[in-house]
């Protein structure tokens, strides 16, 4: 359901909508946002982002991550702003969609267990060893698919999840380049940036496929085939497809904004280091 981290879904209290924002959203969509675990998954994404910021500093700053850089990264990955960006994009894209069938599924014990498993797997994948094991599990099972693998494959294909994630990753990379350029750390034309980003397409697709399947297999392995089939069937409905498109609309916007801000910030940090 959810996008990968931009390098590659906030605690409930910190992600609560403001009274004005909540009042402006249809009650059904507000409920759906809560049911699909959006606040929790955005919190995990913030944690991923803070880790990525440290990695970025190691790779691009001679002295590594300074205290100033860590504070900058923390501001960029502001959980309230991240959640608001995703919610706004999601609600706008779902404006003409009846959320009733989606709420009916997710507002059940089985639906909430699926969401909890997704969040748990996403957090577990932050560990490099866990991620490596999940990728290996995917590759092994792809050669001899079991029932869970086939259902996960149906889920991925029904919602074009690999391609949607690839597009999001490439857009984020382009936004990062623009931030670097606007910050004076990269001398490339927009055409050169686009060419460089598109050159990463196949590598990004292969990496995304491994990560996505590894993540979903880890999340859904404890789920019965009957429940997982219901989830796949829901995702193939008009409402299910609309929900996934809406989530990508929100997350794509969030990651594009974050990636640009990271590029701009790292460029300024590089310049400050040189002075």
Image (cartoon, rainbow, N blue to C red):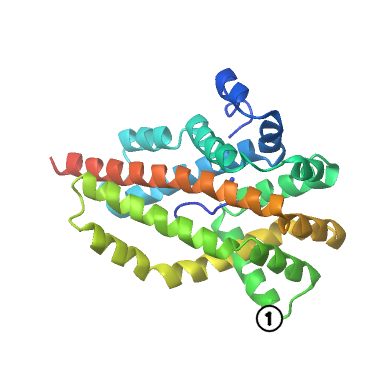
Q: Is residue 243 left or right of residue 225?
A: left
Farthest left residue in view: 275
Residue placed at 59% from the left, 18% from the top? 19
In the rendering, at what x and y percent does residue 26 appear?
Answer: 66, 30
Give 20 or 204, whichever is nearer the viewer. 20
Residue 80 visible in this rendered orientation of the protein: yes
Give 117 or 245, whichever is nearer the viewer. 245
Q: Is residue 60 left or right of residue 33?
A: left
Q: Which residue is mark 1?
A: 143
Residue 8 visible in this rendered orientation of the protein: no
In the rendering, at what x and y percent does residue 45 appear?
Answer: 53, 44
Residue placed at 75% from the left, 45% from the top? 102
Please tell me whether residue 135 is drawn above or below residue 177 in the rendered image. Answer: below
Give 58 or 103, whichever is nearer the viewer. 103
The image quarter in which residue 18 lies: top right
Q: Is residue 80 left or right of residue 200?
A: right
In the rendering, at what x and y percent does residue 206 appear?
Answer: 51, 71
In the rendering, at what x and y percent does residue 194 appear?
Answer: 31, 62
Q: Please tell me how crowded label 1 is: few (under 14), some (14-19), or many (20+) other residues with Cα within 10 Å.
A: few
Q: Secondary structure at mark 1?
A: helix
Farthest top residue in view: 19
Residue placed at 58% from the left, 41% from the top? 90
């Amino acid at each position: 359901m959810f996008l990968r981290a931009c390098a590659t879904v906030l605690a409930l209290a910190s992600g609560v909508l403001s009274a004005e924002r909540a009042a402006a959203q249809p009650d059904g969509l507000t409920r759906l946002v809560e049911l699909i675990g959006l606040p929790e998954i955005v919190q995990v994404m913030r944690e991923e982002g803070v880790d990525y910021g440290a990695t970025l500093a190691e790779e691009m700053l001679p002295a590594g991550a300074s205290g100033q850089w860590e504070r900058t990264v923390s501001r960029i990955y502001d959980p309230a702003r991240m959640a608001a960006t995703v919610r706004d994009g999601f609600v706008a894209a779902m404006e003409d969609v009846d959320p009733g069938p989606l709420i009916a599924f997710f507002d059940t014990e089985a639906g909430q267990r699926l969401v909890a498993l997704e969040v748990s797997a996403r957090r577990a994948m932050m560990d490099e060893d866990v991620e490596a094991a999940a990728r290996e599990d995917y590759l092994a099972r792809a050669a001899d698919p079991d029932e869970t693998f086939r259902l996960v494959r149906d889920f991925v294909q029904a919602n074009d999840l690999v391609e949607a994630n690839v597009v999001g990753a490439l857009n984020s990379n382009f936004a990062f380049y623009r931030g670097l350029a606007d910050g004076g750390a990269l001398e490339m034309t927009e055409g050169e940036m686009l060419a460089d980003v598109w050159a990463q397409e196949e590598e990004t697709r292969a990496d995304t496929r491994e990560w996505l399947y590894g993540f979903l297999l880890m999340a859904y392995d404890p789920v019965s085939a009957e429940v997982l089939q219901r989830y796949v069937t829901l995702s193939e409905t008009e409402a299910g497809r609309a929900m996934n498109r809406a989530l990508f609309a929100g997350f794509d916007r969030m990651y594009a904004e974050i990636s640009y801000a990271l590029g701009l910030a790292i460029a300024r940090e590089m310049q400050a280091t040189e002075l």
